[in-house]
């Protein structure tokens, strides 16, 4: 047996052994023989019958399974004969499955582990729900951008760790209140979604765009200087113009202000500077419309 080979070599640190010899884990995986499966398991993996499942095990246990299987071997080596864990397998239709796996060695088989019972529970729906809740904690549902909670956390992180310079663009969505009052909240929501579309297209990691209020947005650009901020503002203006060519109804418009915080400066002050610049841009735009 494979494990007997390891014991005969006098191996005591099994984790290090599998680090040095990953092919041993692969050999152990190839030794797995499934003796029986129940109907629920066949249904879960979208198998037509037992032979269909057993003949296509490599499709179910892919690369994602290898590190989990290695940890199972290490736990067994350390005497842990009952092991609950979460793994990713695949249905025979190709879709990933999140599985809660309970692994227990049959009584009397504790030395060679040659017979074990696996209890599998499909927790894919639960994991998707958890992932969505995590998404909601950091995103604005309407615009698909980051939300204020993420924005505050990111400001605090950048304040502590940088990288500097950090450039901030504060953005106000023009005329949202008027659109809500005159055309209804559905039209206002549509305008917000368009704002999210423009910002989502223009802003790439490590920068982040966030909706931080009803009609207020912010873009955080770590490691970006004032020139990079000005270039993004110009790109946003062009994208807004393009967006207005494709959507009828209310016109999308941004008032924007940009400021940069260098190492040793305070981001709080930079946010105020960007806010002041944004209101100045709003004033200039308003004056331009009034004179026109």
Image (spheres, rainbow, N blue to C red):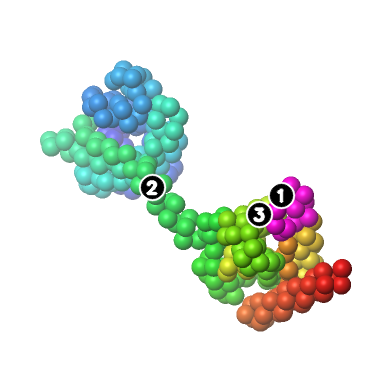
Percent position (x, y) of residue 41? 28, 30
Residue 11 makes an appearance in the image: no
How far apart are labels 2 and 1 at the CA level? 37 Å
Quadrant housing residue 227: bottom right
Residue 130 makes an appearance in the image: yes
Quarter holding the C terminus is: bottom right
Q: Is residue 60 magenta?
A: no
Percent position (x, y) of residue 203? 68, 57
**Nearer mark to the viewer, of 2 and 1:** 1
Percent position (x, y) of residue 268? 62, 80
* Pointer 2 residue: 127
* Pointer 1 residue: 247
Tag shown at residue 194 = 3
Percent position (x, y) of residue 90? 41, 33
Q: Does the magenta stretch include residue 243?
A: yes
**Nearer mark to the viewer, of 1 and 3:** 1
Quadrant housing residue 94: top left
Q: Is mark 1 on a helix, strand or loop?
A: loop
Quadrant housing residue 194: bottom right
Q: What stretch is highlighted in magenta?
A: 239-252
- N-term mark: 2 or 1: 2
Q: Left or right? Give the position of 289 relative to 265.
A: right
How far apart are labels 2 and 3 at the CA level? 30 Å
Q: Left or right? Give the position of 194 relative to 232.
A: left
């Amino acid at each position: 047996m494979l494990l007997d080979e390891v014991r005969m070599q006098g191996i005591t640190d099994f984790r290090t052994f599998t680090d040095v010899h990953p092919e041993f884990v692969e050999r152990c995986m190839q030794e797995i023989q499934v003796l029986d499966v129940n109907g629920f398991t066949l249904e879960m993996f979208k198998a037509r019958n037992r032979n269909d499942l057993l003949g296509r095990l490599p499709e179910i246990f892919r690369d994602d399974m290898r590190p989990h299987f290695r940890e199972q071997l290490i736990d067994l080596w350390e005497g842990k004969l009952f092991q609950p864990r979460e793994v990713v397998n695949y249905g025979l239709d190709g879709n990933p499955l999140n599985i809660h796996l309970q692994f227990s060695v049959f009584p009397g088989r504790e030395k060679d582990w040659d017979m074990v019972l696996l209890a599998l529970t499909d927790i894919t729906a639960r994991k998707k729900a958890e992932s969505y809740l995590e998404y909601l904690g950091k995103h604005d549902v309407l615009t698909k951008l980051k939300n204020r909670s993420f924005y505050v956390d990111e400001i605090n992180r950048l304040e502590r760790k940088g990288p500097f310079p950090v450039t901030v663009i504060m953005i106000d969505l023009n005329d949202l209140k008027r659109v809500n009052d005159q055309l209804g909240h559905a039209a206002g929501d549509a305008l917000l979604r368009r704002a999210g579309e423009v910002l989502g297209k223009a802003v790439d990691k490590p920068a982040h765009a966030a909706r931080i209020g009803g009609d207020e947005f912010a873009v955080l650009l770590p490691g970006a200087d004032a020139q990079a901020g000005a270039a993004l503002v110009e790109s946003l203006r062009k994208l807004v113009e393009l967006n207005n060519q494709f959507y009828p109804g209310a016109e999308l418009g941004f008032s924007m202000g940009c400021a940069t915080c260098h190492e040793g400066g305070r981001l709080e002050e930079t946010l105020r500077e960007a806010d002041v610049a944004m209101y100045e841009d709003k004033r200039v735009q308003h004056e331009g419309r009034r004179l026109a």
